[in-house]
Amino acid sequence: MKKQNASLLALLLAASTFFFACTDKVKNDIGALKFDSLQVNRTEHLFGDTAKPACNIVMNVTYVSQSADSVLKDSLNTFILALCLGDKYMNQTPAQAVDLYAEQYIRDYRRDLEPMYAKESQKGEEYAGAWYSYYKGIEGHVQYYHGRLFVYRIDFNEYTGGAHGIYMASFFNMDMETLTSIRLADLFVPDYELPLTDLLWNQLMADNNVATHEELEDLGYTSTGDLTPTENFYLSEEGITFYYNVYEIAPYVMGPVKITLPFDAVRHLLNDNKLIANIEH
């Protein structure tokens, strides 16, 4: 899971460089953005036989439909498609991209599973059809859009056989004045990691009505990973929320973990950041 988040972050940073180079004409006015969404819901069976297992792909991707600045519109849509679908699709129109992605998912499903299914069928072996029934869901939407700040959330949900599927959410914060991603180092003073980690522990203890790290650990926290500041965060009027997907710091059964630190709680660690001031006002 952490590897996937790191991969997405690397893609974001690469894309941000591209956006900045292509949008040096973007003004402080963020462009009166308007949004629309594209939906896909397709089910395709192995060998085209409705009696056999199938894959289902469901997509709901929000994109910029209108803007006072066409360069800003195109750049944001490129950014959104890269995050939701991968850089292979970032230069397509949103409608083309979601259709091409769905087609590729179905082709890959049939390519990977039809030979295996046919082989087991010929042998007369018992097999569970559910293990051949795949699902993939992708939902991208604008979580926050105000002033300089643009926050986009992507939810992935996938089942490829086994005991259960896997799901995760990724958040990407953008400074609209520069069209660059916002990272923790952009918000906090140097050497922020240890004091910010203490604040996360304290807030998680308060959220769970316990007084010690040990009590949190007894509940299951940090049994699958250490509690440290994650780049998977989002900004809002409430503060900065750190989002840990399943397995990152807790077992699957506990679900994702969200820790929100109000800006007042981290004020002493924030740098002189006008973006935060804009959110608070």
Image (cartoon, rainbow, N blue to C red):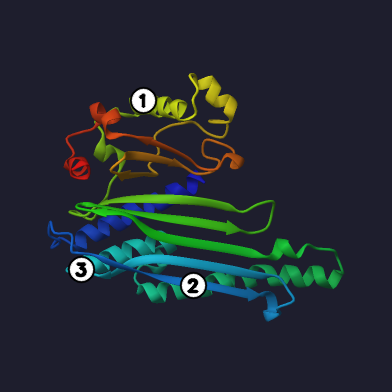
Residue 71, numbered label: 3
Q: Position of residue 100 (x, y in %)?
A: 46, 75
From mark 1 to mark 2, how far is it between C-alphas? 44 Å
217 to 49, vertically: above or below:
above
From mark 1 to mark 3, how far is it between C-alphas? 40 Å
Q: Position of residue 109 (x, y in %)?
A: 62, 69
8 to 251, vertically: above or below:
below
Q: Amino acid at mark 2?
A: Val
Q: Amino acid at mark 1?
A: Leu
Q: Nearer the viewer, residue 184 or 34?
A: 34
Residue 279 in the figure: left or right of residue 171 = left
Identify the element where label 3 is drawn.
Answer: helix
Q: Which numbered disc, 1 or 2, marks the residue that appears first in the sequence? A: 2
Answer whether labels 1 and 3 touch (C-beta < 8 Å).
no
Residue that carries the numbered disc 1 in the rendered image: 194
Residue sitting farthest toward the bottom: 48
Assess disc 3: are there few (<14), some (14-19) or many (≥20) residues with their C-alpha within 10 Å of its C-alpha. Answer: some
Residue 93, numbered label: none
Q: Which numbered disc, 2 or 3, marks the residue that appears first in the sequence? A: 2
Q: Position of residue 11 (x, y in %)?
A: 37, 55
Q: Nearer the viewer, residue 108 or 170?
A: 170
Identify the element where label 1 is drawn.
Answer: helix
Assess disc 2: are there few (<14), some (14-19) or many (≥20) residues with their C-alpha within 10 Å of its C-alpha. Answer: some
Residue that carries the numbered disc 2 in the rendered image: 40
